[in-house]
Amino acid sequence: MRKFNVKVNGKDYAVEVEEIGGATVATAPVAAPTASAAPAPKAAPAPAAAPAGGKAVNAPMPGLVKKLCFDNGATVKEGDTIVILEAMKMDTPVVANASGVITYSTTAGTNVDTGAVLCTIA
């Protein structure tokens, strides 16, 4: 762990940063913090892989899954709107990238990151 003092909007924060890989570097002691630093957010899990024989449909951006347009097991055609994502108060349709039977990997009301697998089409 390396410690740094960071000034943000005129406020000083003492932060610890974990160095992954690379050489270890000796550091000088860091002064006591003047304000408590916010805890770091947890890393998002990696997107799930598509099942064998299926074609994954990934989220084009982070957002809220507002609506699943079909039931699991329904047959969809390439170009059909299959999910509605809401990002920044705007609804964005996500379309099928292939024709086949859809299996959703998410549910309505779930927040997803860019690249998350929304469903597979086999």
Image (cartoon, rainbow, N blue to C red):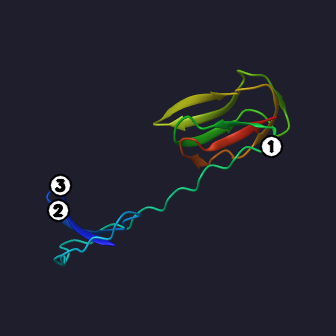
Q: Is residue 19 above or below residue 47?
A: below
- Amino acid carrying label 3: it is Asn
Label 1–label 3 contact, CB within 8 A = no
> Nearer the N terminus, badge 1 or badge 3?
3
Q: Position of residue 45 (x, y in %)?
A: 58, 56
Judged left or right of residue 26, residue 73 is: right
Residue type at the position of mark 1: Ala
* Residue tagged 3: 9
User: With respect to residue 55, does 46 lie above or below?
Assistant: below
Q: Residues within 10 Å of mark 1 (few under 14, many from 20)?
A: few
Residue located beneath label 2 in the image: 11
Dots 3 and 2: beta carbons under 8 Å? Answer: yes
Query: In this orientation, which residue lies closer to the viewer: 9 or 100?
Result: 100
Tell me the tag on residue 2: none
Q: Which residue is mark 1?
A: 52
Is 56 placed left or right of 19 in the picture? right
Question: Does residue 48 appear to the left or right of 29 in the view shown?
Answer: right
How far across and down, in percent of the image, does residue 56 sit? 70, 37
Give the label, 1 or 3, closer to the camera.
Answer: 1
